[in-house]
Amino acid sequence: MSAMSLPEHEFQYRQQLEDAKAFIHTRDRFLVVSHVSPDGDAIGSTLAVGQMLRQLGKSFKMINEGAVPVKFHMLPAHEQVLNYTEASQSGTKPEFDCVIAVDCADYERIGRVSEWFPNQVPLLNIDHHPTNNAFGTVNLLRENAAATAEVLYDLAVALNISWNKPLADCLYTGLLTDTGGFRYSNTTPMVFSIASELLHYGVEGNELADQLLEKLTFSHVMVLQKALAKLTFSPDRKIAWMSVNLTDVQESGADNADLEGLVNYPRNIEGVEVGLLFKQSSEQTYKVSFRSAGNADVAAIAQHFGGGGHVRAAGCTVSGTLESVVEQVLAEVRRVFS
């Protein structure tokens, strides 16, 4: 199919791939960053970009606001991802001339790492969230991609990157986690095609699935126990929610990785259309995670509060007491879902 006969969105995406290639080829000294509280797609994408830049002979540093969650420590070069919180306290600031942000739905999701960015720093924004506001100097965005890892597969092909197991492991991790083990509705034929190809490069899919989707830490089980004790339903049982406060986290010894996936418990209950998790982040601030069974656009709800995400999975931050936050969010859920 010629470029002139491509659908408009596909033509634009191919042009974005060319722009992303040019951004990388014409620059050196990169800082690669993903979103705060990184998940499998964020970490896998960060490391995958590092693999590509290394092949291209570029200078780069990888960073996140916090530490790489322990469950991703099996991925190659995970120890090279700097912890911004530690690095900023020690005064260890890497030298860089440009930024590649992966899996960040908006600029704020980069977190405090952006404090190191010079004014008007060239930034390549690579993402798959429909709510991404194209905050980059150059943007490589595909909202129908299952994961940022899928977009990076296209970029690797465009850059003529040589395939190997480390790169394949990182991209497979992003696909595996953002599709819920190839179970969510974003699991397209293209996802299976890419995953199949990655397996040819030595990915051991069963081991990654076991480590990333099946294994539970003791602290996760402890904080889950506390959250389930507060499980609440709307009168029609179509909305269900749980909450986790700072004391729950402290007593459980849980970290951000342990809180990941808790919101799926209320969503997975039969008859529930919207599942919610309210995670206290400070005395008067709650991070709200949304999951939809399919009939509610939770991205629209999250955007109402300044957040974003996907139709079936989104998040935002709301200030106030738990009672007031729950009341505000439920009112918006009912408004959108009614």
Image (cartoon, helix red, strand yellow):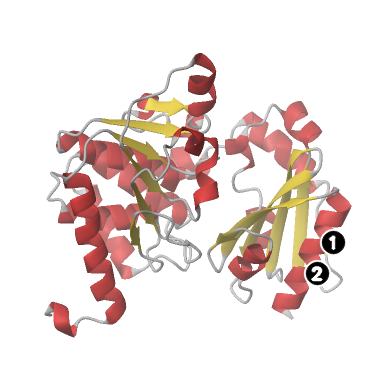
Q: Residue most toward the front?
A: 119
* Quarter of the figure that contains the C terminus: bottom right
Q: Which residue is mark 1?
A: 327
Q: Which residue is mark 2?
A: 331
The kind of residue on which mark 2 rests is Ala
* Quarter of the figure that contains the N terminus: bottom left
Front-lying residue, 65 or 219 = 65
Tell me whether circle 2 and circle 1 mark residues in contact (CB < 8 Å).
yes
Q: Residue most toward the bottom?
A: 5
What SS does tag 2 mark? helix
Whether residue 205 is visible = no
The kind of residue on which mark 1 rests is Glu
Q: Residues within 10 Å of mark 1 (few under 14, many from 20)?
A: few
Number of numbered discs: 2
Q: Quadrant of residue 313?
A: bottom right
Q: What residue is rendered at 42% in x and 59% in y?
A: 182
The picture places residue 57, in percent across and down from the top left corner, at 15, 33
Q: Is residue 111 left or right of residue 304?
A: left
